């Protein structure tokens, strides 16, 4: 997965993935403008295999993370990245299973399909628990992300997962024991989005420690 | 803050805030490309006023969140948003104090300055505790975000906060009792990014409940 080579980049003015638009508005009598980018709503799922008490994460190469790592190492110059100086593993992240809401069905159904596609588990809808919703990229996209907790068992594993190859996805399924998960995600050498950090600390505060949950008012 | 009117929007191909670029690379022998957008690294700070045991959040109008809310209400049509149908309060979020790393000084110093500018507290550097680092927008930006926990007291409050008006910032400082904070952020009607969700559950798992911290390996 992390054998990365021949890396180049260029500025573009058109992208089907990143479409900037400008909002103009009046706030408290003052005219303002703000540039945003169109995105899809999404789901993310904290997958907990209760047969072996492990969390199931997805590991993948993220070009944007790689670019930033390469830049901080001085490996970026004139449209190229030196992949000797910045090896591909620097762009590998650990994340919750996730996907975009691009079909006309419930977010629960989309979450169920992502768990199957990325992690190989056929999880019944009743094993999906909605944690809460939040906003992604409040600065530029502001889309809704619905967060789930999914209890799976070894018996539900019907495939390898790995993502949708026709979409270019190349995902490795990783298991981390629940007892080691907090130390794992807090380790600064492990590249994670804040969503995974939330998933684990939510579990610690609201699931594992039921007392904390009740006193804190977590539903 | 939430008196929003005269809202229009248009597609743009150039923005100084959102600059798309395309990375081309070879992964495991396969040629691929990915579109990213340039952003800055950032800091976010969970501000805890220990004089009154409250968390200090920032409340602001986020155009991107507002646009998404308006769209889901059917208030978007042909370049305009009907602000009667979609009132401005729908775009108001609650977040941790945060800022971009755009100066040549330590992330601790930038965090300290953001706490002063947005929340009005002059916090000594020794009261800033680094929680961890994570990646923002792994899909498109992949920048580094450094997360801090800051203990402040009423005696450190030297100003009103509110953000930098020359940058167009209009921020309201909000206090939420620590005992109510988990219920507050988990409430689906409260618009929050996942970063704030993490801040609160990290506190519950690693600070308030020191036992959970040790057993989980949180440093």
Image: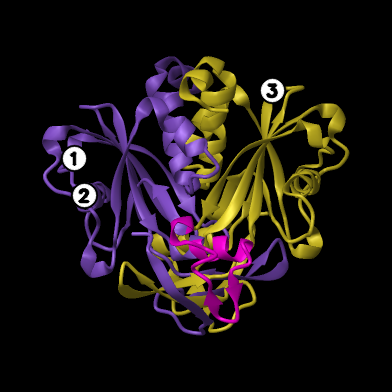
Chain colours: A yellow, B purple
Marks 2 and 1 in Cβ contact (< 8 Å): yes
The chain letter under disc 1 is B
Q: Which chain carries label 3?
A: A
State whether residue B141 appears in this view. no
Disc 3 designates what residue? A53
Q: What segment carries the magenta color?
A: B66-90
Residue A10 is situated, as x and y percent measured from the top left of the image, at 52, 80
The residue beneath circle 2 is B109
Looking at marks 2 and 1 on the same chain, the residue that comes earlier in the sequence is marked by 2
Residue drawn at x 22%, y 56% as measured from the top left: B105
Report whether B23 appears left or right of A161.
left
Image mark for residue B125: 1
- The local secondary structure at tag 1 comes to helix
Magenta run includes residue B87: yes
Marks 2, 1 in one chain: yes
Q: In this view, does A203 lie above or below B170?
A: above
User: Residue at 68% of width from left, 27% of height from top?
Assistant: A54
Q: Please give the name of the residue rendered at 68% of the width and 54% of the height, measured from the top-left corner.
A: A1
Q: Do labels 3 and 1 share a chain?
A: no
Which class describes the residues within 10 Å of circle 1: few (<14), some (14-19), or many (20+)? few
- Asked whether disc 2 touches disc 3, contact meaning CB atoms under 8 Å apart, the reply is no
Q: In this view, does B102 lie above or below B57?
A: below
Residue B24 placed where, x, y %? 61, 73
Q: Quadrant of residue B165?
A: bottom left
Q: For this rendering, which residue is in front, A69 or B141?
A: B141
């Amino acid at each position: 997965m992390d054998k990365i080579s021949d890396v180049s980049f260029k500025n573009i003015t058109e992208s089907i993935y990143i479409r900037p638009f400008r909002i103009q508005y009046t706030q408290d009598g003052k005219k303002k403008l703000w540039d945003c980018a169109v995105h899809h709503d999404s789901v993310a799922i904290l997958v907990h295999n209760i047969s072996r008490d492990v969390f199931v994460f997805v590991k993948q190469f993220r070009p944007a993370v790689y670019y930033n790592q390469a830049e901080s190492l001085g490996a970026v110059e004139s449209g190229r990245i030196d992949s000797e100086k910045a090896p591909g593993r620097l762009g590998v992240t650990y994340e919750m299973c996730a996907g975009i809401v691009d079909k006309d069905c419930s977010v629960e159904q989309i979450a169920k399909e992502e768990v199957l596609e990325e992690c190989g588990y056929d999880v019944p809808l009743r094993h999906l628990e909605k944690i809460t919703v939040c906003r992604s990229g409040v600065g530029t996209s502001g889309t809704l992300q619905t967060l789930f907790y999914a209890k799976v068992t070894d018996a539900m594993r019907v495939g390898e997962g790995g993502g949708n190859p026709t979409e270019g996805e190349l995902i490795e399924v990783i298991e981390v024991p629940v007892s080691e998960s907090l130390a794992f995600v807090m380790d600064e050498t492990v590249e994670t989005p804040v969503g995974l950090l939330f998933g684990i600390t939510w579990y610690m505060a609201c699931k594992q420690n039921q007392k904390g949950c009740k006193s804190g008012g977590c539903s």
